[in-house]
Image (cartoon, helix red, strand yellow):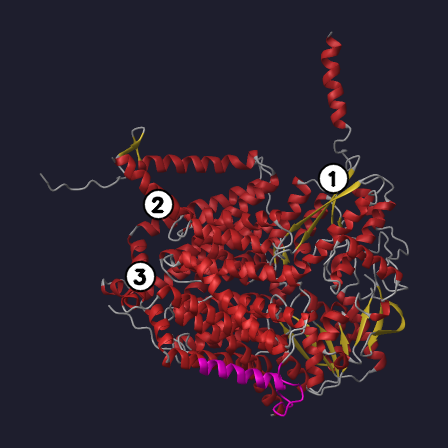
Amino acid sequence: MATLETSRPATTAAAPLFAGLSLRVWQIIGLAAVLAAACVLPFIISSYQLLLANQVIVYAVALLGLNILTGYNGQFSLGHGAFYAIGAYTTAILLDKTGIPYWATIPMAGVLCFAVGFLFGLPALRLEGHYLALATFALAIATPQLLKYKDFDFLTGGVQGIVITAPDAPGGLPLRADQWLYFFCLLWTIPLFIVAWNLLRGRTGRALVAIRDHPLAAATMGIDTARYKSMTFGVSAMFTGIAGALGALLAQFVSPDSFDFFLSVRFLVGIVVGGLASMAGAFFGAIFVEFVPNIADLLSKAAPQAIQGIVLIGCMYLMPTGVMGLVRALGHRLGRRVAR
Amino acid sequence: MRYRSILLPAVAVLALAGPAVAADAPGVTATEIKIGNTMPYSGPASAYGVIGKGETAFWKMVNDQGGVDGHKIDFISVDDGYNPAKAVEQARKLVEEEGVAFLFNPLGTPSNTAIEKYMNAKKVPQLFVATGADKWGDYQHFPWTMGWQPSYRTEAQIYAKYILKEKPNAKIAILYQNDDFGKDYIAGLKDGLGDKYAKMVVKEASYEVTDPTVDSQIVTLQASGADTLVTAATPKFAAQTIRKVYDIGWKPLHLLTNVSLSVASVMVPAGPEKGVGVITSNYGKDSTDPAWANDPGMNEWRAFMQKYLPGADMKDNNYVYAYGVSMTMLQVLKQCHGDFSRANIMKQAANLKDFEVPTALPGVKINTSPSNYHPIRQMQLQRWDGKTWVRFGDVITGGES
Amino acid sequence: MQAFLHQVLSGFATGGIYASVALALVMIYQSTHHVNFAQGEMATFSTYMAWKMITIGFPYWAAFLLTLLFAFVLGVAIERIIVRPFYKAPVLSVIAVFIGLLLIINSLSGALFDYTIKPFPSPFPSDAWYGGPYLSPHEVGMIFVTFVVLALTFFFFRFTPLGLAMRAAAENPVSSRLCGVRVGWMLALGWGLAGLIGAVAGMMTAPVIYLDPYMMFSVLLYGFAGALLGGIDNPWGAVLGGFIVGVLQNIAGAYLVGTELMVTVALVIIIGILVIKPSGLFGRPIVTRV
């Protein structure tokens, strides 16, 4: 006899998943393990490998910024390299020309990028899809030109760029300069991710996603789309700008050539491969952005760029929704099986 | 009994220590020297990647001929995509992970600027960097970094001197690429013209590498009423410039950067008759210039290309460059007489006396000293006659470092 | 005054290059609702094919026509093999694929054909009557060809059943299928035609700016700007947009801010225009059903 059965959800966060612990608890354990590993890392890997790890972290913050805008809010940006550049140059100029300590330049870079992003987001409100892409692309092209402009040379160092020195560990700590820099970047990354997580899982996050998926419905529901969209631009720019500032400390050098249009393209590719609308995706994307050129270089000297393209298309073929998309899909399947 | 238990490990340690890296010559074993290099194999400057290709083939040739003092060369060239942040990574990888003895001919002003401080802090030679920027001769602040080719600034100073001599009342227009390469020419002209610069230069126009054409800039420059044009442009844009200048009926005294003097890659595409009268300078031989068709030095290069890079584009002067700079490096290694410690390599690099490479113009000699880190400072002016570059005047030595 | 006229006409000539690429972008957009960032590289590669044929000894027009065929087949092949699997994928994933294509084709062009520039012949004789002091015969011929291609494209989409079917397939694949339109083949055809138009653009552009692996890269960027400025769903608008971008750049460089900020100012002006008219000068405003 057929009876009406309410179907049990495949899995809930609180339901026991494995070894008596729920999914939520497993997530927390996983996160703690990752954090612990991140803190131990500088002491067990070589200086060069630490440089790579540090670069991945910096890129992850940059990609998180872009993902907030493009992944969660659906505003297409082909110009986030510009905000990365502004952040980097802010730090470089302040360190080069003023006595401001390095740790103070980071929030200043963030604030400046927020302002620029917000101001850019205002006229961008009128633009959709491809047109917004063009506007942001214009920003990506204009920024190196402005950085090279001779009237700004006294500030930016022009085409020669600015060389800065990485800070030493604060007095007393038994850390090398590059180890300290790694922890310094972590000290920024972790709170930034927490802020983003908080922002995105609450009302704001839902509003952003609503604006992305059904802007008309969102407006009808009383969401002030204009305000949200421009604020999102500002916040997104702030994240990427802080990443740029940290990146400048890492490379100890900024020049207009470091921030060409390709950088923006790499960022976009990074969030797509990592997974749109996903925070963990920022890390996978960062790993992709950092390591694929190296791998391509090992595979081919004649056409390494072609290898990069092939890897990119291959990743898209295997994971059209990015790494995190794949993880989620696997997670659902796993959840369904466990729930039976 | 006890002796055997320590004898074996002791022998093992000694056996390992033999071919192991000597404490004062990193990157060097009894049979091998590791040389590192960064090149833009991908990205917007990947056209220069052929230099790395040429150098890889060159060191293979050296190995085939027995190496240097019984040492084979392990040439490790990696891609930096013309991105300074990547260059820093790759330099550190080469020095710290691969353990190279030194870096040879890393390419690009931004990349080299980014790694300069690190290389000097670590006391690793950064030799014969592949950029024409003027600053690579700063032996006081960066004693481990050395350039090779005459700087763009020096070249521009030579042009300035020429203008002052031949056409002291010239009205000068400048077309330059908006990067360190182009701007170095402006700096050199300012050096050479001194306070006459403001009066003589009536118009400067720049273009980006990502621009499709420079037609607009040429029109602007002609409209300024200038009668002299200095072009600091890479081959594609130089060809466009020469052609456009001719097509609009402008006949200035035209001075061209030696980066774009290739007969097959610039003068012929522009139209050989359109460039008649253009003046450039050079320190090396253009592989497509009929003047060097039977030159023994260039034949040596051609034989090398045919054997080790068959099918490569013989019109690409980057291969000539690669050969010349590699020959210089080979000379340094030979002068080391087996002592390949970093200090000695640097010492020998700063100890080249009247060294000539087969691909350099006759009369151009490479000289370095502890207070002169500009190996090549000589150039000779040459004029295009429709078929070939005709050298005139003496070999000129450029400004002091 | 003379200089001004010269700048405008020179900008017009450059704009012609942008316009021809903009047409290829419009073709691909109208038939697939995607902007193919690899369009420029495909055009460059096709032009290299033509160059190779001419170098071997083919007469110009034979090489031209064979290249058109090659470009068409290349476009169809890329669509069927590389792009088709992503039909249902999110927009950004498709864009990532296009970027991948761009990287691959650009790298292959360089590896196969070297980086030294290659002169490319023009079918328009250099002493033709329609040349002048400001525009060479080839530049005039190129603008003429652009308009011919534009007219053909417009006519094709507006007045032929096939063009209608293609537009329908892009606009509303589900309903189109119900009407008997073979959507899959429409998309492939769109790519083929876009490749063909791109090849024409490449072969018209190469004599002016010389052939090298990066030839179309910069042209694509400004062609993209021009197409959007004029309205990417409107071939006339896109072509006009291309011309406007060309002239605007020249005026900005010569009279407004100088060449060091030329590109920046040109783009800022374009953005400004778009903010006022968000669908482009001649594009149809996007209407969404609630």
Q: What residue type is labelled 3?
A: Ile
Q: Nearer the viewer, mark 2 or mark 3?
A: 2
Please indicate whether residue B49 sits to the left or right of residue B390 in the image.
left
Where's the N terminus of chain C, which quadrant?
bottom right
Q: Nearer the viewer, mark 1 or mark 2?
A: 2
Q: Which amino acid does label 2 sit on?
A: Ala
Q: Mark 3 points at which residue?
A: A211
Q: Mark 1 points at which residue?
A: B27
Question: Is C203 in front, or is B84?
Answer: C203
Q: Kindly identify which chain the residue marked by label 3 belongs to.
A: A
Please indicate whether residue A18 sits to the left or right of residue A60 in the image.
left
Q: How far apart are marks 1 and 3 (CA)?
A: 58 Å
Mark 3 nearby-residue class (10 Å; few <14, some 14–19, many ≥20): many
Across and down, in percent, residue C159 comes to: 37, 81
Across and down, in percent, residue B3 comes to: 75, 10
Judge whether residue C151 is colored magenta.
Answer: yes
Q: What stretch is highlighted in magenta?
A: C123-152
Q: Mark 2 points at which residue?
A: A329
Q: Distance between the residues labelled 1 and 2?
A: 48 Å
